[in-house]
Amino acid sequence: MSPELIPEMYAAGFIDGEGSIQINPSKSGGGKRHYWGVTVQISSNCREVLDFLNLIYGGHITSWVSKKSTQKKTSYNLRFYGGDASNILEKVIPYLIIKKEHATMALKFIEFKKRLTERKGLTLDEIQIRNNFAFIMRILNRKYGKSAGGDFPRGVL
C-alpha cells in the first residue's frame, strides 16, 4: 500500500465514525437571501488528530467544553466548507463505508451549485432542486442516527 493513500483512509475512517456531511442553509444579506452549502465535520476529544487532518486538508478547528459533562473535558470540531469540503470528499470517497451516500450526494450538490454560479438568481425549479438535495441529505443523516437539526426556511418543501 502506498503511503500517500494512508491520510485519505485515515480521514475516511474519522468521517465515517465521528463525522457528518451536511447540506445546511444559512442566511445572508440581513436574512433576505438563503444560501445552502456543504459542511463536512469531524468531532474528537483528541486535538492532535484534528490538527493532522487540518494540516493536510484545511478546514477550521473550534473547541468547546460541555456544560453538562462532570469532567469538563474539551472537545473539538474540524469543519470543512466550500472548496475544502469538496477537496476532502473527493479524496476520501473511495474509502468511505457508512457515509459514501452522503459524500456522493454532497459532491452532486456542489456540482449543481457550480453550474448556477455563472448567473444571478435561481429559478423556482432550481430552488426546489437545491432544497431536495438538502432534504435527501437530512434523510440520510437520520438513517444513520444523526439528526441534521434545524428546519427548512418557510415555504420550502
Image (cartoon, rainbow, N blue to C red):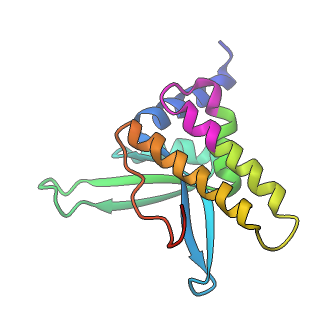
In the displayed structure image, the side of residue 29 where residue 123 appears, left or right: right
Question: Vertically, is 108 above or below 32?
Answer: above
Question: Vertically, is 116 above or below 51?
Answer: below
Residue 101: give x, y in percent of width and height.
57, 33
Residue 54: give x, y in percent of width and height.
57, 48
Residue most extreme to the top: 1
Total label count?
0
Residue 35: give x, y in percent of width and height.
63, 69
- Which residues make up the magenta segment? 92-105
Nearer to the camera, 151 or 36: 151
- Residue under the point 52% across and 51% down: 135
Residue 48: give x, y in percent of width and height.
44, 44
- Residue under the point 16% across and 60% down: 68
Question: Vertically, is 112 above or below 99?
Answer: below
Residue 104 seen:
yes
Residue most extreme to the right: 118
Is the magenta region chiefly helix, strand or loop? helix
Residue 22 seen:
no
94 drawn magenta: yes
Nearer to the camera, 132 or 62: 132
